Amino acid sequence: MLRIAVQSKGRLYDDTINLLAEADIKISQSKRTLLVQSTSFPLEVLYLRDDDIPQSVAAGVADIGIVGENELMESGEDVEVISRLGFSGCRLSLAVPKDAGYNGPEWFEGKKIATSYPNILRRFLGERGINADIHIITGSVEIAPGIGLADGIFDIVSSGSTLVSNNLSEVEVVTQSEAVLIGNKQMSDDKKEILSEMLFRFEAVRNAEDKKYVSMNAPKDRVQEIVSVLPGLKSPTIIPLADNDWCSVHTVLDQKRFWEIIGKLKELGAQGILVTPIEKMIY
Ligand code: PRP
Ligand code: ZN
């Protein structure tokens, strides 16, 4: 049994649960106890506050965890980063009131900055020789300047709407962050085996992202031309049809080039183009 620490609520929760579900690792959502066992995979989920995840993995309370890089950096805990998950992207930025007359990082000299990420901020300021007063608060950092508690803030920015609604402007992006899968450095071989099966499934899910399964009817005399515009995995599948002048062509297309390729296929006489989402893909 492998134990994974995940955020009990908040920005990472939904994405984490979706990833597990897509990997067919079923976790009961009705039983919201601290520890829930999967009914379909040797995994148990430990729900924690995000700031507690790096430490619980480092200490071996959980074997692995899904957490924002921001929390990992802030904690400074010694864990292995197993993979970057590509979701819950955000940045950690300094922001000041719109009318503050910001003129560069030196603006913060002697100022008071509210944050939940004092360690990352201290490093940033230290590297630039700026002395500022770091005021640690754990929630609603964005209201600090408005109520006179601080001159600026250092916080997570995702869409930026929190800053806008608090009349703040983002002046320095200190670091980028996304969800990462972290692991304890001394995991047993049994656990490593479960982990590698889980990673295999995660990869199959990610490979299928942005991919579509496409099938179409093609006039036989243009099949070569049609095949030449398809990037496909290996080579497309060609299936004969009852009508001898036509055949059916099946392939996988990247979302990014989708419309461009579909346009060319239509020009070449393809008809009845069917586009289907792909759930998983194993190379
Ligand atoms: C973070 C941050 C901001 C908000 C920024 O809070 O503290 O309030 O997200 O996101 P936006 O740029 O999309 O508006 P979070 O949701 O993590 O909750 P917390 O403040 O309780 O940690
Ligand atoms: Zn938070």
Image (spheres, rainbow, N blue to C red):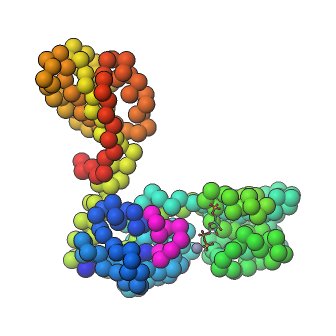
Q: Is residue 47 visible?
A: yes
**Start and end of the magenta stretch?**
7-15
Residue occupying the point 34% across, 23% down: 265
With respect to residue 70, does 267 lie above or below?
above
Q: Is residue 79 visible?
A: no
Residue sitting at 41 percent across and 24 percent down? 263
**Quarter-wise, where is residue 228 in the image?**
top left
Is residue 14 part of the magenta span, yes or no? yes
Locate residue 216: give its quadrant. Answer: top left
Residue 71 vs residue 276, the one in the foreground: 276
Given residues 203 and 28, the one toward you in this image is: 28
In this view, 173 is above or below 185 = above
| Image position, residue 56 (x, y; %) | 43, 83
Q: Is residue 224 depicted above or below 193 in this figure? A: above
**Which residue is more in the foreground, 232 or 11?**
11
For the point 30% across and 27% down, which residue is it? 272
Q: Position of residue 19 (x, y in %)?
A: 38, 62
Is 206 included in the stretch rendered in magenta?
no
- Is 138 displayed left or right of 21 in the figure? right
Q: Find residue 22 and report its image quarter.
A: bottom left
Image-quarter location of ligand 2: bottom right
